[in-house]
Amino acid sequence: MVVESLRLADFRCYGEAEAEFAPGVNVISGPNAAGKTNLLESVYYFSSLRPIRSLREKEMVRTGAAAAGMELAVFSGGRRKQLSAVISAAGGKKLSRNGVRLRTNAEMLGDLRTVLFSPDDLFLIKGAAAERRRLLDRAISQLRPSYYSALAEYTRLLAQKQKILKEHGEKPTLLELLPSYNEKLAEYAGILISVRHSYVNKLTQFAGTCCESLSGGKDRLTAVYRSLSNIPDTSLPAAQLAELALAHLRSHREAELASASCLSGPHRDELEISINDQPARAFASQGQARTAALALKLAEREIFFRDTGEYPVLLLDDVLSELDPERQSGVLNRIQGGQVLITCCSSEAEPLSGRRFSVRNGRIAAVRDL
Ligand SMILES: Nc1ncnc2c1ncn2[C@@H]1O[C@H](COP(=O)(O)OP(=O)(O)OP(=O)(O)O)[C@@H](O)[C@H]1O
Ligand SMILES: [Mg+2]
């Protein structure tokens, strides 16, 4: 998958800007606050239909302007697609593909796949288990729409069960519904655990090799998927996992009622990451955590490639800061193959080949091929 060109109008700090990207490495360099992350965000937007940093899309409209316009030419699966988005400062947006207006976000998802690494991804290593579950859920959902639906259904049932647990004091008859909710939740739990298990196997394998090479052989990354306490072996078939999940739910009935919260299920799963056999969350240095987070993202990209035959576009924001020169060149060597947009401050190491965009004060000031 390749982003061939980009046109922006009143997007973030950009008035008008155009870029033609190379199919390989594209370096976006410039001082702080020049507009480097904003440029990546405009590409990222088409793959997720949400901004990188803010929650509200209208924040992407240039201050004082009525609307932001973005156009992207994407080449994928042997075809060229023209994607466009207009975001209004008053709220609302228009999406279109090849000039045809799309009615829903869902229609555009899939036209462009990206893997983004941003400074916030340190939380993948240092943050709570929810961060790692999100990584798994997002990555698997991109590959398997059936996983996405199962997860959506599980989440919907969980929210309803949560309501029962909170409100049964006032309405005791609600408790009669609990066993059937648990049965349905267990069924979906079996599917989620089974799919997560096989994805984690691949992720660990690729991320391990990648982390080792990025760190020059210093960091050995391992990851263990931990689900319910009565499921030490997550490789079992989904039906057996579902039975065990149901037994776990039943044994936690009293505790769930007492705490009025859903204590049992894969919404509490953990992906335990260790570096050189020490839990990364507690022990990894900043540079080690950054290397490990990046290794997970590169592994996600590799798995996507093996599954679909196309690399997603890799967006690397500020990946080189905090890394020593050896790790910096490890990263630059690893990102060959597929298209990459990488931002860096001018002082950092830069790839020897690729197209270089110098960004200054919300303008693409110069482009040159190295
Ligand atoms: N809606 C907006 N309208 C106008 N300017 C904006 C808008 N949103 C963000 N900006 C400005 O865009 C500028 C560039 O931001 P960006 O995050 O792209 O910088 P950067 O080049 O990535 O810098 P750094 O090296 O510090 O990460 C910032 O000064 C920011 O205030
Ligand atoms: Mg930035």
Image: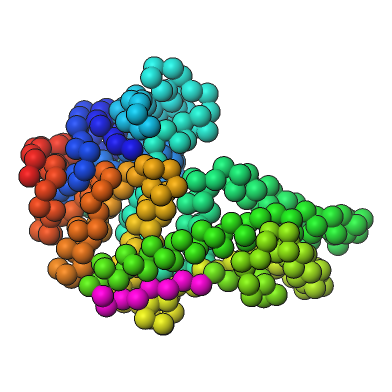
Relative to 188, 137 lies left or right: left
Note whether residue 65 is visible.
Answer: no
The magenta stretch is 217-224
Residue 139 position (above or below residue 363)? below
Relative to 332, 250 lies left or right: right
- Quarter, ligand 1: top left
Image x and y of residue 62, in percent = 30, 34
Note whether residue 83 is visible.
Answer: yes
Q: Within the image, what quadrant is residue 146 found in?
A: top right
Residue 78 position (above or below residue 232)? above
* Image point (38%, 47%), residue name: 305
Q: For residue 105: magenta?
A: no
Residue 31 position (above or below residue 255)? above
* Image point (74%, 55%), residue name: 187
Q: For residue 219: magenta?
A: yes
Relative to 41, 126 lies left or right: right
- Of 215 and 65, the residue lying toward us: 215
- Of 91 and 308, the residue lying toward us: 308
